[in-house]
Every structure is written in C-alpha cells, then in structure tokens.
C-alpha cells in the first residue's frame, strides 16, 4: 500500500482524538503525529496529585453488533495513563508531585478507563473504542472528567502482525484530560504572546497545521485563542475544522456555542460529531437546551450521535439542569 493512498481514521467521536492515522509509518513524513511539543503555561505553584483506581461496578460495554472484541486494558493500563498524564503536565511547565492516597491536592478517581479493539471483516482494519470517566476532587469540590473516542484504525504494516496505532488517540486523550484538570483546578495558561506566535505559525491552516490548531485548545487562554479558532472554522479543510471543533470544546467558552452549532448543522458527519461533543462539554443552559433539541430530532436516531450523547449524560454528576437550578449557574 503506497503513501499516495493515506488511510484516515474515521472519527465518530472524541476529541480528544484527531482523525489522522496513516496506513504506514513511512507515510507520516508529511503529516506530523503525536507526541507534539506542548506549549508551556505561565509558572504556577507546585501541587500534589493522586490517581486512584475506582473502576468497580458495571463495565463499559462495546456495541453488541461489533465483531471480535479484544479488551486492551492490561493490569498496568492505569499506571500507563498516569505516567502519560504527569508527563503532559510537566511538559506544560507545571510541577505535579505524585503521592498515593486521598490526601493529595488533586485526587483523580478513575471510574472508567477502557480501550477495546474490535475486529472487522477486513483484516487490515479495526474499530477502536476508548472511554474515560473520572471524578476530580479538589478543595472539597468534585468535577467530572469525561472522554470518549470511537474510530476506525488502520493496521500499521499488517503483514508483520503489528498492533494498530493507538498512540494518537491515547495521547490526545491524555492532553485533553490534563487540559480539563488544569482548567477546573489549577488555572494555568499560556500567555498571549505565545498564543499569538502559535496563531502566526498556523498561517493559512493547511492540513499539516492540525496539531497547532489542537494546541490552541490546550492553552486555557480563550481570550487569545477563541477569535483565531472562530476564523479557522471557515477554512475549507475538514481536518482543520474538526480540530477547531475539538479545541473550542477544550477551551470551554460558552460564547463558542454559535460556531459549534453551525459546524454541527452544516458540516460532514465527522465534524458534526466533534462539534456536538464540544457542545456537550459547555457547561451552560444554552448548551443543554441545544442538546435537548438534538435528542428530540432525527439526528438522535444516529447510533453514533446517540452513543456520544448518552455517554456524556449518563452520570447524574453531569446533569446540567439540576446543577443550574441549584446553583444559579449561567
């Protein structure tokens, strides 16, 4: 299979995961892959963090109509995730110190961490499902961290029997979770000068710029990043538009709803799902009302849309209506 026929990962949801896996490692030369350099944040105080295994209860099941499920969760899956999470935080310039137990400044109780590889009739393809759900406890408050990915992974050098390339969605998941934790509990951000430099590097937003567009979403500086992302939403490049949708969700700015709604209503299937995922991450009554309208429409009959919405809404901790009524939230 030659490099003139790149294989794309069919993203049905999650963000965190960009939709680019090429069929051969040699083809990656023109399209940068994870890990990418992380834009450092302004200095913050050091903190302690614990990642606890709370994965009891009902397991997250893959869809029943998929073939040949292979669970990728080894005993050290959580340890691997934790190492990657700490590494991402350190790459951002934060100074986390890992401790065991419940006495850390930040306690991430992981309730779901699943990766399932499901075979397809074609031996060179596999469906990849990644899901994470956790409670972040900080200063007596709890913040729910949710991540989800469904996609079609092409095998890397299938003749040699290699496993599918799962590092891209896993690295993206870690970056998004780290960004969510930072936004909820730490508040570190990239300064305006760094963001402006990054925007200038994106330029006309060719496909090769997708990592930079994603990086804008991890800056935790919506004032500097959102206007550029809104402009990039009009670029006629589906990969860039998907990254724009992901990044707007990562920044969590409620004013992004009109742009995300437009992407959801007027774009192709992959972009629509990325935009809807980001809308699900906006903590506002307007976003909740929009999702309610989606559920009442024909769009909710799509298995991918229904699976995505249900994954984000199945936990009472994410019941925006209850929280808004009890707290007077926006």
Image (tube, rainbow, N blue to C red):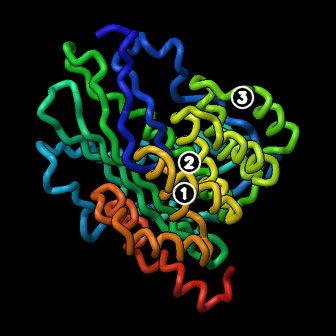
Left or right relative to 182: residue 192? right
Left or right relative to 327: residue 120? left
Looking at this rendering, what residue extends furthest in the bottom direction?
A: 326
Asked if the residue under mark 1 is in contact with the one under mark 2, i.e. CB atoms within 8 Å, the reply is yes
Asked if the residue under mark 3 is in contact with the one under mark 1, i.e. CB atoms within 8 Å, the reply is no
Residue for badge 2? 246
Q: Which type of secondary structure does the marked residue at label 3 adopt?
A: helix
Residue 90, picture quadrant: top right
Residue for badge 3? 202
Q: Residue at x 60, y 29 (%)?
A: 36
Q: Where is residue 220 in the image (x, y as percent from the top left)?
A: 72, 52
What is the C-alpha distance between the residues marked 2 and 1? Answer: 6 Å
Asked if the residue under mark 2 is in contact with the one under mark 3, i.e. CB atoms within 8 Å, the reply is no
Q: Which residue is drawn at 34% across and 19% down?
A: 23
Viewer-proximal residue, 49 or 231? 231
Label for residue 278?
1
Q: Residue at x 30, y 41 (%)?
A: 128
Q: Which type of secondary structure does the marked residue at label 2 adopt?
A: helix
Viewer-proximal residue, 169 or 78? 169
Residue 211, picture quadrant: top right
| Position of 275 relative to 33 (above/below) | below
What is the C-alpha distance between the residues marked 1 and 3? Answer: 22 Å
């Amino acid at each position: 299979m030659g490099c003139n026929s790149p294989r794309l990962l069919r993203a049905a949801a999650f963000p965190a995961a960009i939709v680019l896996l090429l069929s051969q490692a040699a083809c990656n030369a023109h399209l940068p892959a994870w890990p990418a350099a992380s834009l450092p944040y302004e200095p913050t105080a050091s903190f302690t963090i614990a990642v606890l295994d709370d994965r009891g209860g009902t397991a997250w099941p893959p869809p029943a109509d998929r073939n040949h499920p292979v669970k990728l969760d080894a005993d050290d899956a959580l340890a691997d995730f934790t190492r990657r999470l700490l590494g991402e935080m350190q790459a951002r310039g934060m100074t986390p110190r890992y401790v065991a137990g419940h006495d850390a400044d930040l306690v991430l109780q992981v309730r779901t961490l699943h990766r399932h590889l499901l075979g397809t009739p074609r031996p060179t393809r596999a469906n990849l499902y990644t899901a994470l759900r956790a409670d972040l406890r900080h200063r007596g408050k709890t913040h729910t961290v949710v991540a989800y990915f469904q996609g079609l992974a092409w095998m890397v050098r299938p003749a040699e029997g290699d496993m599918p390339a799962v590092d891209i969605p896993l690295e993206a998941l870690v970056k998004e979770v780290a960004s969510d934790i930072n936004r909820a509990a730490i508040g570190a951000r990239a300064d305006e000068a760094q963001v402006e430099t990054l925007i200038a590097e994106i330029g006309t937003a060719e496909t090769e710029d997708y990592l930079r567009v994603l990086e804008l979403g991890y800056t935790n500086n919506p004032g500097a990043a959102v206007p550029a992302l809104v402009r990039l939403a009009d670029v006629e490049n589906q990969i860039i538009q998907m990254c724009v949708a992901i990044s707007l969700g990562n920044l969590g700015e409620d004013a992004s709803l009109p742009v995300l709604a437009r992407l959801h209503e007027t774009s192709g299937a992959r972009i629509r799902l990325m935009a809807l995922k980001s809308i699900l991450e906006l903590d506002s009554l307007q976003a909740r009302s929009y999702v309610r309208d989606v559920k009442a429409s024909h769009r909710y009959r799509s298995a991918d849309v229904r699976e995505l919405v249900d994954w984000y809404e199945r936990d009472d901790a994410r019941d925006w209506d209850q929280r808004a009524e009890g707290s007077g939230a926006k």
